[in-house]
Amino acid sequence: MIINLSYKMDIKETSKDSKTVIESWGLVREKEHKICDMEFTIEPNKIYYICGYSGSGKSSILRDIHKQLYPKGTNWKYLLVYIENYKEYLEEIDTDKLMIDYFPNVDYNKRLKILGKCGLTEVWKYITKIEDLSDGEKFRFMLYNKMMEILELKKDTYIIIDEFCSTLDRITAKVVSQNIHKLREFLNKEGLNITFILASAHEDLIPYLKADYNYFKEFQPVLNKI
């Protein structure tokens, strides 16, 4: 796919203060920023990691990838999951249940195995309501929830996650990143392909995630000034 993104800023009307800012720093009223211009090949069953500074355009790239991957027609051959904000995702499910009570139709031991691979290893958390978990634990539960849904639907999946592990402490973030490979291998054994497309500002995850493809997103310069 070709990702060619830019945005324009056109300040036609200004307040007294904004005019002062423009004149004081010699800014222009119109400019265009190039976010990204590249060919991005996505192979099934691979892990992609987009890393870069906050505000460099990672989220815009993910939204464009999601748009281009979105299945056409009604006979979808794969599942497409896009988590832009995991907190909004959790608002759509019943968080008043104990963690271990989700997906009761799935074998108990299999649930424990996937919980562990998602970084949820504290046994007493299994009998805690999701609404009572910390932000970091809720992120890990979101990952667990999606893995279980994929198992139930039995469809090859592209899963796009923005701000991957951003709310976790760095040790837990590295453990979860390391386990992404194990999650993929687990689903492969279930006969499913899963493609992870992840984005974060944290470079320290790169050696633990061991993505098949890493892309560092730098800031792009202004294209033109008028």
Image (cartoon, grey):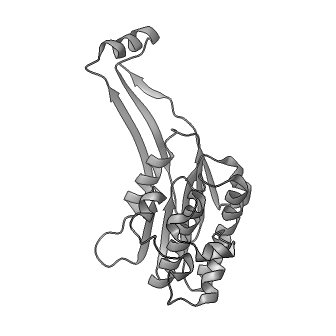
The quadrant of the image that shows the C terminus is top left
* Residue at 71% across, 63% down: 175
Residue 153 position, x and y percent, is 44, 83
The quadrant of the image that shows the N terminus is bottom left
Residue 120 position, x and y percent, is 65, 70
Q: Is residue 51 left or right of residue 208?
A: left
Task: Please tell me whether residue 145 is drawn above or below residue 66 in the rendered image.
Answer: below
Q: In which quarter of the image is residue 147?
A: bottom right
Residue 56 position, x and y percent, is 52, 39
Task: Please tell me whether residue 96 is drawn above or below residue 199 in the rendered image.
Answer: below
Comparing 74 with 100, the one in front is: 100
Q: Is residue 47 left or right of residue 67?
A: right
Question: How many numbered marks are there?
Answer: 0
* Residue at 65% across, 62% down: 212
Q: Which residue lies furthest to the left in this view?
A: 13
Residue 135 position, x and y percent, is 56, 57
Q: Is residue 91 left or right of residue 44?
A: left
Q: Quadrant of residue 225?
A: top left
Task: Please tell me whether residue 114 is drawn above or below residue 20 in the rendered image.
Answer: below
